[in-house]
Image: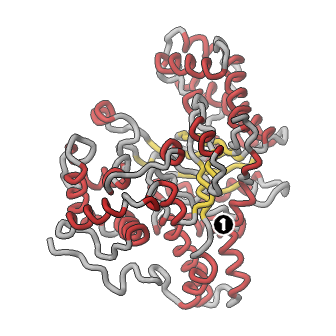
Amino acid sequence: MTQLIQNSQFLSDDFLLKNKFSQQLFHGYAKDLPIIDYHNHLPPAEIATNRKFENISSIWLAGDHYKWRAMRALGIDEYYITGKASDAEKFDKWAYTLPYTLRNPLFHWSALELKRYFGITDLLSPTNSSQIYSTTAEILQEESFRTRGLLNQMKVEVVGTTDDPTDDLSHHLAYRKEGLSMGMYPTFRPDKAFAIGNPQNYSSYLVTLGTVSGMEISSFDTLMEALYKRIDFFHSMGCRVADHGLERLSFSRDSHLAADRIFQNTLAGNPPTAAEQEYFTFQVLTLLSKQYHAKGWVQQFHLGALRNTNERMALRLGADTGFDSIGDFDQAKSLASFFNELDKTDQLPKTVIYNNNPKDNEVFASMIGNFNDGSIKGKMQYGSGWWYLDQKDGMEKQLNALSNLGLLSCFIGMLTDSRSFLSFPRHEYFRRILCQLIGQEVEQGELPWDEQWLGKIIQDICYYNAKAYFNFSPQNFSANP
């Protein structure tokens, strides 16, 4: 394959910006704003220790199931993806793969990441793979290319990590003690607390949860007591956000079921029925949501992923290795019922909902309007395009659905939802798409030619709305070092 060379038309300063007004909005209002990345999966330890990466494979390919899926589709053996091949060999295979990802978001993302972090404008291919590997390895040894330096380069103001209730948050504490300007805040992710489908795994998890909570968990009530204790601890460590990954929100009013009886049966090793799982999850989530409301937290729900579909590969490689897909679940009725249950007693927290299936765009965009109550701007949020929808087409459809059925001006904007420290140009990608969407309608006479007014709305969506909504602050830390 011949080398792919950068050209003036691709990835220029006006990439994705097709008219003068869009360009003015991006360059004048969006481009230089800080980033509040309120949801990601970055390892807190690597920020606290300011990790230095030995090469680009260790920071760019390790853990990136987006890239792994593309490599598998091209017929590349697992040995070069998650296997024992050297980092250089894995990078060579990715360099071979990348040119074939055209029209996949990986093509844009990868080019942006090489350009923004390393100043590389040639498009990666087999002919320049070795040169780029060695060049980036050298650059990554510079102090400014440790994890914190990479975040500073992208003007990241806040990192919201994703943490299990059993986590001691020691890395967050160590980082906080350094008094640095960039905030790293934990997010409470209690999915394992209601994952009763595998009784053996659940029982083991309860032992760990009980240990960190300083109590024995022997009933549903003690389970919730332990979770409340962990919420208190997370709150003292600056946490103001909870997150949950579900196929759909649960709602059950089955009078024949009881949470403690389901809990005891699970501890006895009896797998629950589907109805029991639904009821138990509903009970746990409802009580947790009320606690979030009392604390003033934001709750997030990532809904609609069908996970671990390939049993053979899941057994071999584990979860989050690239074998999840868009799920086809009914969402509307359970969403409405769950939120209504909390709203009846005015205990519905600020809430962000994300869909993984594009068929649910309008359902989610319209649902948030049912539970906005005038208590706060944008209390209910339809989250940015997530997972299979965090690409150009998905972002545009999410923005259009929100605009048509809600208020785009109240939107809290983009996040990376990533495990990679090189993923922050996704915010730039989103900002360009947003500015083009608005600018195009100005050019067409569908919006007024008012740069200052529209520029302020762009800035709110890209930064200021999230800053006000989450209220991340160093003052939120109260745990004793």
Q: Position of residue 36 (x, y in %)?
A: 62, 59
Q: Position of residue 61 (x, y in %)?
A: 33, 52
403 or 378, nearer to the observer:
378
Q: Is residue 236 left or right of residue 66?
A: right
Q: Is residue 443 left or right of residue 68?
A: right
365 or 456, nearer to the observer:
456
Query: Where, by quadrant of the figure, is residue 294 drawn?
Result: top right
**Residue 98 vertical placement versus 364 (above, below):** below
Q: Residue at x 67, y 65 (%)?
A: 405
Figure colour scheme: secondary structure
Q: Residue at x 57, y 74 (%)?
A: 434
Query: Where, by quadrant of the figure, is residue 194 drawn?
Result: top right
**Residue 241 vertical placement versus 269 (above, below):** below
Q: Is residue 148 left or right of residue 455?
A: left
Is residue 15 visible from the viewing direction of this image? yes
Q: Locate the N terminus and report the quarter of the image it occupies.
A: bottom left
Q: Residue at x 49, y 70 (%)?
A: 429
Q: Disc 1 designates what residue?
A: 463
Q: Is residue 373 left or right of residue 228?
A: right
Query: Where, by quadrant of the figure, is residue 130 drawn?
Result: bottom left
